[in-house]
Image: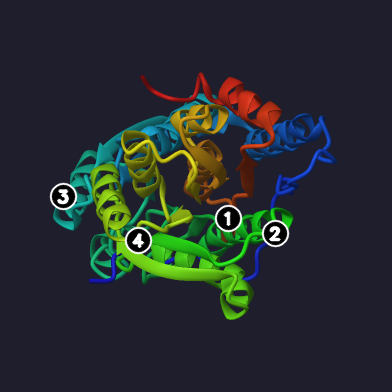
Amino acid sequence: MRKNTAIRGTVFLVCCLASATMLTSCEKDDSEAKISEKVKEFEAGIQKSSVDIGKNKGIVVGSVNMGMNGEWFAEVMNGIRDAASDLGVEVKMLDSESDVGKEADNIHQLLDEGIDTLVISPIDVDQSAVPINEVLDEGIPVVSWNTTVNTDVTASVGVIPDDLGAGAGEYACEYIKAHDLKNVNLMILENTTYEIGIGRCDGFRSAIQDMVDQGLINVVCTEEAEFRDQGKEVTEEALSEYSDIDMIWAWNQGALTGAADALKEMNESDIILLGVDMSMELADDMLGDKIDLEAVTTQLPYNMGYKAVVNAVEAAKGNKTEKNIWIPVSTYTKNNKTRLEQYKENHKDLVNE
């Protein structure tokens, strides 16, 4: 079953975040300040796109979410809630818990209660299209975020999945070059179910392909993992079977935190870990010395939720919206502790306890 599709195409970045992939002391101390400034500019641009809050009175936004657990989704939810508050609209938020049947029920419930627009992270590229088309047939605009669906929604908000994988892959290659490493044995925690996962894995593999061809990187095993417990289990099993693994890359936050748990439990502080989707916990891991978490490529989930609501409200008022809204990506690295500390400061109020 194909669960969702990545937003693909030529990226038009609303703002440009500098990627911290420098591995030497030449990295500028003010890099985080510059990046924070760009993030603030992006967020300000989001808020400026709503010109007359008075005209938003009475608008009801339906929010159907693929999931609502975990730090990443918590940030998206906060973006959705804050946008609704800033725009003076009501939001009705429901959790589909990665179940297409529940997703359809949630959509039907919101239709019965009455909504003016819908923001949604579709679970299945084909099955999710059925209830979404019912919303569109009612003349209600639909804005998808993070994942897309096989129907013509009003707008889509997200990132290019390949870029998230490529960011960590490029860093891995730079790290190997900088440290003059040879015959690096790599384990990949992959995903073959979601197209956003497939895109991330494709981007990572593409970024490291030259080194694979040169024999500098050897992919010794690939394991499927989505959630934390799965990531931990398959990492422990792989390390028991392959004692010479030097590096691990994980496609999402669940698999990455699971791999980190396994490395901590097995006292494996020399294995290089990289992945996708930053979190407060992972920032602490990068700042600590229990494991060697070198790089995490991430998106801005708060901005994704915020921007989805902004465009949904504009569409509900009959205003023209961008068809594709691209959220920037950035790579956090272990050697830039200033950025990591700033990340923690910037995100401490965005995460639900």
Name the residue that disc number 2 marks. Answer: 180
Of tags 3 and 2, the one toward the viewer is 2
Residue 122 percent coordinates (x, y): 33, 57
The residue lying toward the viewer, choosing from 215 and 253, is 215
Q: Dot 1 corresponds to which residue?
A: 168
First-in-chain label (3 vs 2):
3
Residue plotted at (55% across, 56% down): 164
The percent position of residue 158, horizontal first and vertical second, equals 52, 54
Say which quarter of the image contains residue 67. Answer: top left
Mark 3 or mark 4, earlier in chain: 3
CA gap between label 2 and label 1 equals 18 Å
- Give the number of the disc on residue 136: 4
Query: Who comes first in sequence, dot 2 or dot 4?
Result: 4
Which amino acid type corresponds to the residue marked 2 in the rendered image? Asp
Q: Secondary structure at mark 3?
A: helix
Element type where label 2 sits in the image = loop
Q: Position of residue 243 (x, y in %)?
A: 36, 56
Contact (Cβ within 8 Å) of mark 3 with mark 2: no
Helix, strand or loop status at disc 4: helix
Q: Which mark is in front, 3 or 4? A: 3
Separation (CA) of disc 1 from disc 3:
34 Å
Q: Residue extending furthest bottom?
A: 213
